[in-house]
Image: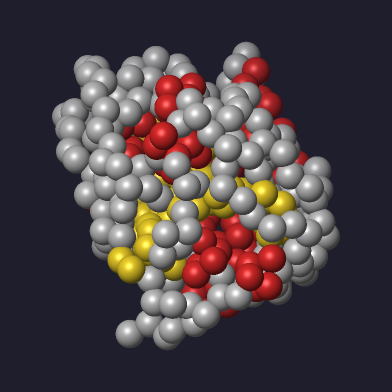
Amino acid sequence: MRTAATVSALALAALVIGPVALQTSSAAHASPATLAHYGGASITASKATTTRKARTKHSTKAKHSARKADPSPEPSTTTSASATSTAKPTPSPTAKPSAGATAKPKKPSATATPRVASTDNPLLDGTVINTVAYGPHPRQRMDVWHQTDGLKRPGVFLIHGGWWSSGDKKYMTAITTSYAEQGYTVFNINYRLSGDAAWPAQRTDALDAIATARRHAALWSFDPNNYVVVGFSAGGHLASAVGTYGDGLPGLRGVVGISPVTSPMLAYEDGATDVFDLNKRKLRESAIQLAGGCEPVKCPKIWASMEVPRHASKGDVPELAVHSQDEFVPAEHSLRLKERLKAVGVSMTVLTEPGSEHSTPMYRLPGVAETVQDWIAGKLL
């Protein structure tokens, strides 16, 4: 039974840094699928076909339920936002805590009133985009794409990649658009990079963003007990770190990693043995930087904390990982996690695509986005 709560205009203003106007088109996102209907127009699109390796291609209609709320790295379309320092996030401990120990961010402050996005895309009619601070650092920001129709919608959290040291949510705009078109409330987050703070700051930020979204769910037509987290490359590492945090996060239904670096230790080892692969060498150095410039022999506890498979527990949620066969983040990263999750009774699917594409370029291959979207639809209530 949900507790009724009235959200005043003042409360809404107290969360939002600034509205963002969107200029995009329905062709901006990756491979389309048959989409759900949420109190607006029914959305359908033709499905791409391709030969899938290591799986049988499936195509299902995404089916979601929207319940009436109780009163209460690829450049794409760029959004603008102002940055305001506000709440101080609670740091996440290096040791694995209980689920009740998740970050509890304070309420961010306001600088503007939200407005409906300006768009020529009819699939985004009524979409409002706010940039919200979930912490005091300029990188602790997320763009919230939501409706104001009184429905509680499933949520999708997107985490960009970039070697943990670069990247930005603005490069995720096209992918964010594709999920907003399906009727989800979408949270496209930035986080502190390794040059700003060492591990576990990045995991802390992801947890704080989710905690902020859940705490103020009524403002964004969001069901706080029905969401998934999707991460790309280094962001896939953070998504899996969220998925294996403590004994499970409330409301989390699944985690998706696109070329996820779930084992920084494997990246460290591969970068030392395959010295002619410049990407593997760079990933090794990036993992060292994530650990504060400290190598495993000197900082074993930090590296153990970064290593996602070590934190698998029976309270974790199902995961999906997609890798290219010949990319520099091999499927072995996810297979290590799959083995540990299987041991505690949690399912994980690892798919391998032909070729060497990595992260968002692989996600844009025919059929990949559709497969991910169908998996997400099957996990959300």
Q: Nearer the viewer, residue 66 or 57?
A: 66
Query: In the image, residue 192 lies at what x, y percent?
Result: 73, 50
Q: Nearer the viewer, residue 189 or 255?
A: 189
Left or right, 289 with reference to 253: right
Task: Work out which quarter of the rendered image holds the C terminus and state it.
Answer: bottom left
Rendered image coloring scheme? secondary structure
Looking at the image, residue 260 lies above or below residue 101 = above
Residue in the image at 27% along x and 45% along y: 36
Residue 282 placement (x, y as % from top left): 68, 27
Say which residue appears at 50% left-offset and 70% top-offset: 218
**Can residue 264 be seen?**
yes
Q: Is residue 200 visible?
A: no
Side of 53 relative to 2 (left or right): left
| Residue at screen point 56% across, 75% down | 7
> In this figure, what is the number of numbered marks?
0
In this rendered view, identify the residue nearer to me: 193 or 145: 145
Instruction: Please say if 130 is above or below 34.
Output: below
Residue 66: give x, y in percent of width and height.
31, 60
Asked if 327 appears above or below 81 in the picture, the reply is: above
Residue 201, horizontal then vertical, whole percent: 71, 57
The quadrant the N terminus occupies is bottom left
The quarter of the picture where residue 346 lies is bottom left
Residue at figure coordinates x 36%, y 42% from the top left? 182
The answer to which image quadrant residue 213 occupies is: bottom right
* The image quarter in which residue 371 lies: top left
The reply, left or right, for residue 319 in relation to residue 7 is left
